[in-house]
Image: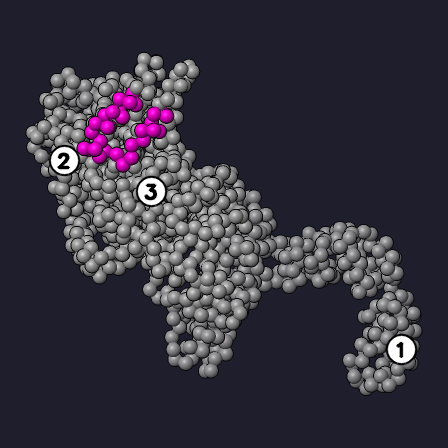
Amino acid sequence: MTVAGVTTDWEMVVGLEVHCELATSTKLFCACRNAFGDEPNTNVCPVCLGLPGSLPVLNRHAVELAMRVGLALHCRVEPSIFHRKNYFYPDMPKDYQVSQYDEPLNVGGWLELPDGGRVGITRAHMEEDTGKTTHVGGGGGRIHGADHSLVDYNRAGVPLVEIVSEPDIRTAEQAKAYVNELRAILVAIGASDARMEEGSLRIDANVSVRRGGEDALGTRAEIKNLNSVRSLGRALEYEARRQVALLEAGEAVVQETRHWNEDEGRTSSMRSKEEAYDYRYFPEPDLVPLAPSDEWLAGVRAGLPALPADRRAALAEVAGVGGADPSVAVVVQLGLDGLVKDAIGAGVDARLALTRAANELANRGAPEPAAFATVLRMEAGGRLTATQAKAVLAELAESGGDPEKIARARGFEALGGDVVAAAVDAAIAESPEEWARYAAGEAKLAGFFVGKVMAATRGKADGKAVTALLRERLTSA
Amino acid sequence: MAGISRDQVVHVARLARLDLSEDELDRFTVQLGAVLEHVAGLEALDTAGVPPTAHPLPLVNVLRDDVPAPSLDRDEVLAQAPAAEDGRFRVPRILGEAP
Amino acid sequence: MTGALGIAGDVRAGRRSAREVVEEHLAAIAAREDELHAFNLVLAGEARAAAAEVDRRVAAGEDPGPLAGVPVALKDNLCTRGIPTTCSSRILADWRPPYDATVVRRLRDAGAVIVGKTNMDEFAMGSSTENSAFGPTRNPHDPTRVPGGSSGGSAAAVAAGFSALALGSDTGGSIRQPAALCGVVGVKPTYGRVSRYGLVAFASSLDQVGPLAGSVADAALALEVIAGHDPADSTSVAQPAPSLLGELDRGVDGLRIGVLSELVEGVDPDVGTRLAEAAAALEAAGAKVDDAHIPAARLGLSAYYLIATAEASSNLARYDGVRYGLRVDGDDVTAMYGATRAAGFGAEVKRRIMLGTYALSAGYYDAYYGQSQRVRTLLIRDFEAAYESYDLLLAPTTPTTAFPLGAKTDDPLAMYLSDVCTIPSNLAGHPAIAVPYGRGDDGLPVGLQLLAPALGEATMFRAAAALEASLRSGTGASAA
């Protein structure tokens, strides 16, 4: 995003780190259930509690899902090893986290956004999740001012994939689009249910700014506590402005972690990241290297469903529109691309099919393909007005049925041209003052007359036809 | 590389979450210094092109099926806890976020 | 008292009751345990119950297993469900694991009777068992001397007749060295032969569980029971337990045995003499004995003390007072960590955690940990080269006989240097066995080492049996 500065324009540079919980039945290194919302400390065992003597054994399905993520993001899947990331914290049963460091599973891919843009993916590696702490006594469950804390290890050991993007994101909108697309991909491939509200998708953002035209990256701050896509957008815009203000005042941006406060709408400093914590990474001696065979990899690749980007491309081609067409993105996101392709195949106008599907079927069920096509054919043929077609679609989506029967039941038939013309003339005659003003140039009054005609015909007139007739009357007057 | 300063010992003790007394810090500086002097010979070795051995065994791809097994009984687990509350492990207040 | 093989045979055949066997051993414990302190915990009640169960099964015509009624002592870093497993540390003084180690389960399934948890150097860090938080163990041959370490309690238990078998753990020699100093057999298997699940970790890429016994045959029996793939241990070799008892009588005819010259220099003269006698005995028995070379052997010590301490610094981070074990309260959780670990760990453990943390820390990783892992590769290559010309290697186990209590406690480095003969096998992941071979000039036991390539236990036991036999038949050392 361009932040207009005092003397120059600034550019926002963003990279996102997304953690997603994999949809396995069991944890990464033990057979405890991977489940959300169970009673605390009921899904624990010597391994995920890190009891003395315990040892990890890697979950094959977690590896498979992690490979799916990598392939869906066009990464290279490489032989990899696990490393220990050593630090002390109460939610860490072993006071080290088993993760991947410089030999991760997936490297070097990209994510395609609905508008056709691309964000590079640096890596997507596997690691285990930590337990959950709740803070007591601090007001609002916050860590600040708490008296003590309580730890639940049900989540400890749950498999995660951490997806790190290149700093290719330039606007808050783009960041939101990235997250939404990533979520759609993760759900489509069955790797994760990616629900931010349940913690199965977590986002941290790295934000810096630089003067327009500069190549070098500015000092970045890491933003945490982004609990929704909306928060992400708001936080990025706030943080970019904050950094620009600092730099324009001659101050420096501190490399640190900042906490997004949703209520106050600002970020605040948490701790300094300038002295990077010494995690003393070393290869995990209790696990052996992972080298997926070509056969396994080929099988995973072959088993991937069509990804959102592929579906958009396919739909765009059938519809004869550009891949970045907004209604294409919406239709795919709604899962209605098959419906629209069928309708187009049955002869329905592509633009009409796209528009109706995108606008009328959100938050509704999908109508039967044949019924959908029929309604649109009725509309295109003039037998239903646009308004009537939308109403029929709504009913079809909600309760199914036969389009012809529904139209008849509702008394929908487009009125004959002369009936509409008579209603228009009557309306003009009844309101000479308004007609004069309309004729004089108050174009807004068209709506007044359309309304009168609609009332007179009990909604059966086609709005577009009425407007056309009004204009005709103007010129013929 | 050989030897270690007292400041370094203080830093390492903090990393390792060991509250050492002044006496211990002094003593460890000397003792660790002696050990590091001895291992300094390692540094001089030419190991260019020699790969590290992280595992003595040539095993790869040891994997487990994604099938649940019974977890521990929570009472048995919490019975060993120094402090517990509401089915959770209780710890004194945490002053900062995870590093 | 007869050894494990004899006991198991008698009990299975109904010639002796397990009850009678366990009482005999409990009496031995009662007679000298106060003096020797081999145990942190004697499990008299459990042992009697287990023995009774064995007898019940025999009476019912069932076979309790190859270790039927055999009293076994377990090093106190092996998890025993519901029974304190302290690692001889204050930080785990009251900890009762909610699970059994795999090796413990296998022993129980084989009919063994567990008589107690043995004393050790705290978290297996030490070579004398003087680093125990609960006081040292004394050498049964001379109670003014150390039994060795860190499996000192296990070695003493077998040497004193408290148990027929013991399990220990060996990271840098902690089974073999105490076995040598106490005059018993001690085996470090190939890395991955025996499951580490339930062994409280010291250094994950070096640790192995192994048996201590009064004879090579008993050690073979024990290893057959505890070894074999374990799905709960990712570093476990994908093979069943090796067949060893059948190998013992095959002799050494035609075997090529190399004497590790780099390790011979620097040992006490009497130990050196015993080694020469052993070499001669093996030659007399038909082996071809020569000098072998592992140039990187002495480098192993430095590499070991960086790798082992680095892994240990990470493995011991979990002892933080949060979930189990000692907690010393603090104003905040970080203060609690620092106070708990300071109070819970002894000096040697603290030293090694510090050294290991340093070896992994930013700026030092490559020079210390990284370099050590490369030296490890060099050592493995030297071994591979040696094993082109030799089937087995012969070496001292430790440079001296048992030293007096307190002799080395002021000088950690001096203590470390005594591990030079045992460490190479841990770094390479190869098996090695300490076999008693006569006495030193001071009348104290000497134990010698046979080393084999990875998974070479069968050949190793053959030669060990031959060496042991040479003592009996008097073709070797003066077996005083």
State how far apart marks 2 and 1 are (Cα).
118 Å
Residues A78 and B82: in front is: B82
Q: Which residue is mark 2?
A: C145
Q: Position of residue B56 (x, y in %)?
A: 30, 39
Chain of residue at mark 2: C
Chain of residue at mark 3: C
In the picture, the quarter occupied by the C terminus of chain A is bottom right
Task: Give the colour scheme of this rendering.
Answer: one colour
Secondary structure, mark 3, is loop
State how far apart marks 1 and 3 are (Cα).
95 Å
Most common secondary structure along the magenta stretch: helix
Residues A330 and B7: in front is: B7
Chain of residue at mark 1: A
Q: Position of residue C149 (x, y in %)?
A: 21, 37
Task: Classify residue C450 by image quadrant.
Answer: top left
Is A167 above or below relative to A59? below
Q: Are marks 3 and 2 on the same chain?
A: yes
Is A8 above or below relative to C106? below
Q: Position of residue A310 (x, y in %)?
A: 60, 53
State how far apart marks 3 and 2 are (Cα).
29 Å
Q: Which residue is mark 1?
A: A427
* Camera sees residue C328: yes
Residues A337 and B87: in front is: B87
Q: Are marks 1 and 3 on the same chain?
A: no
Residue drawn at x 47%, y 43% as measured from the top left: B74
| Range covered by the magenta-colored residues | C21-50
Decide: few, some or many residues near mark 1? Use Cα within 10 Å; few <14, some 14-19, many ≥20.
some
* Camera sees residue A120: no
Task: Classify residue A58 by image quadrant.
Answer: top left
Badge number at residue C94: 3
**Magenta span has C22?**
yes
